[in-house]
Amino acid sequence: MQITIFGASGSVGQYLIDEAIKRGHQVIAVSRDHNRIKNPNPNIRAMSVEYDDPYSLDLTLKGSEAAIMSYNQLKP
């Protein structure tokens, strides 16, 4: 299964990536800056996204059967 993980460069996102790979899934690891995602596994593809751009989100989700959002809640 292909899973898109948003917020993949954070600590929770990295955990989710590792867990998905252990379970045999392919991962689209998404962050505002794909260079922050460090993982040499060929089953992981890092992508950047503009979260306020529907076209960018659509391209990011293409082919995925599941999506997970992981983010740090900003304090007001």
Image (tube, grey):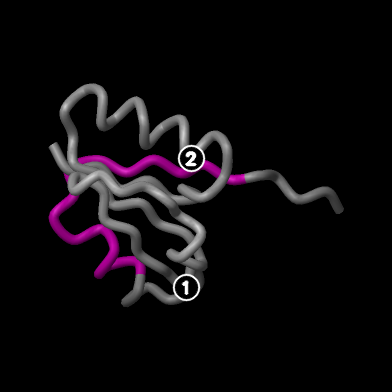
Count of marks, rendered view: 2
Tag nearer the camera, 1 or 2? 2
- Circle 2: element type: helix
Which residue occupies the extreme right position in the image? 76
Q: Camera-side residue: 58 or 41? A: 41
Above or below — where is 60 with respect to 6? Answer: below
Q: Which residues make up the magenta segment? A: 57-71
Q: Amino acid at mark 2?
A: Gly
Circles 1 and 2 in contact, beta carbons < 8 Å: no
Q: Earlier in the sequence, mark 1 or mark 2?
A: 2
Q: Position of residue 44 (x, y in %)?
A: 26, 48
Q: Position of residue 64 (x, y in %)?
A: 19, 49
Within 10 Å of disc 2 (Cα), the crowding (few <14, some 14-19, many 20+) is many
Picture quarter with the N terminus: top left
Above or below — where is 55 with respect to 7? Answer: below
Read off the residue under disc 2. Answer: 13
- Spatial separation of the CA atoms under disc 1 and disc 2: 17 Å
Above or below — where is 60 with respect to 3? Answer: below
Q: Which mark is residue 76?
A: none
Q: Camera-side residue: 44 or 66? A: 44
Read off the residue under disc 1. Answer: 50
Left-right relation of 35 to 42: right
Left-right relation of 73 to 62: right
Q: Position of residue 35 (x, y in %)?
A: 46, 65
Q: Amino acid at mark 1?
A: Glu
Q: Quadrant of residue 61?
A: bottom left
Q: Camera-side residue: 20 or 65? A: 20
Q: Quadrant of residue 24?
A: top left
